Amino acid sequence: MIKNIKKIIQILDEIFQNPKTELYYKNEFQLLVAIIMSAQTTDKQVNKINKNFFEKFSTPKELFELWEEEIKNNIKTIGLYNSKAKNIFLTAKMLLENYNSQIPENLQELQKLPWVWVKTAKVWLSIIKNSSYLAVDTHVHRVLNRLWVVSTKTPIETDKVASKKLNGEDLARLHHTLILFWRYYCLAKNPKCNWCKLFEFCSYKEKNI
Ligand code: SF4
């Protein structure tokens, strides 16, 4: 058992009582597209585009019929838009041709889709299926290390240690609250330590006080 983890989870649950994704979407497929788009981009920027973009399709078939060029035109204000447009188009094509337009609900199978990495797949499964996954990126890696939940060098290592040492229920609860915690409190630079309810558990030497 990881030190203090139950208390940390409880406090996070108290801070964020009904945690949910801040990505805008109207169905499971749009959420997958939004998660792919959100790589190295803020949810805010993705949402701004998707308020209009998501009016143009709701199924893999409808997105496929827009073609890559039209997808590119719609998302060109976010970083990596060329690669994202290409892979969103290929994802729609693959779902249409190989999966009868149904998104696979299995971690391994989901990762066969273009640009769906382990983190992407875990985020989608956590939101749509409430699966017992913690999606670890650089932000979650940073926070878990500051809180001594893990002592690791990379997000991949953090993912492995957390998956091994935490039970499914804890992983699922942490997935939703940790994203909000790093976004609103434990920022990489200038974290809001003066308002942090996890201050007593924190090992970070450069607290912002
Ligand atoms: S005290 Fe500051 S650095 Fe530590 S967990 Fe809280 S916000 Fe993050």
Image (cartoon, rainbow, N blue to C red):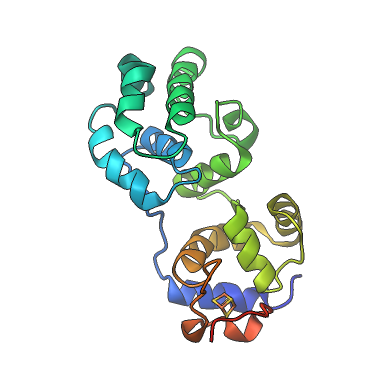
Count the numbered circles shown: 0
Say whether residue 161 is visible: yes
Give the answer, above or below, for where 70 lies relative to 80.
above
Say whether residue 61 is visible: no
> At which x and y percent is residue 66?
31, 18
Identity of the residue drawn at 49% across and 28% down: 83
* Of the pair 148 and 153, the residue shown nearer to us: 153
* Of the pair 171 and 186, the residue shown nearer to us: 186
Identity of the residue drawn at 75% across and 53% down: 157
> At which x and y percent is residue 21?
41, 54
Q: Quadrant of ligand 1?
A: bottom right
* Of the pair 28 and 78, the residue shown nearer to us: 78
Identity of the residue drawn at 65% across and 60% down: 141
Give the answer, above or below, for where 69 lies relative to 138.
above
Indicate the quadrant containing the N terminus: top left, top right, bottom left or bottom right: bottom right
Name the side, left or right, on which 80 lies relative to 63. right
Identity of the residue drawn at 48% across and 78% down: 192
> At which x and y percent is residue 108?
65, 33
Name the side, left or right, on which 168 lies relative to 41. right
> At which x and y percent is residue 100?
45, 17
* Of the pair 170 and 143, the residue shown nearer to us: 143
Name the side, left or right, on which 72 lies relative to 154. left
Residue placed furthest toward the top: 97
Name the side, left or right, on which 203 lies relative to 187. right
Give the answer, above or below, for where 139 lies relative to 63.
below
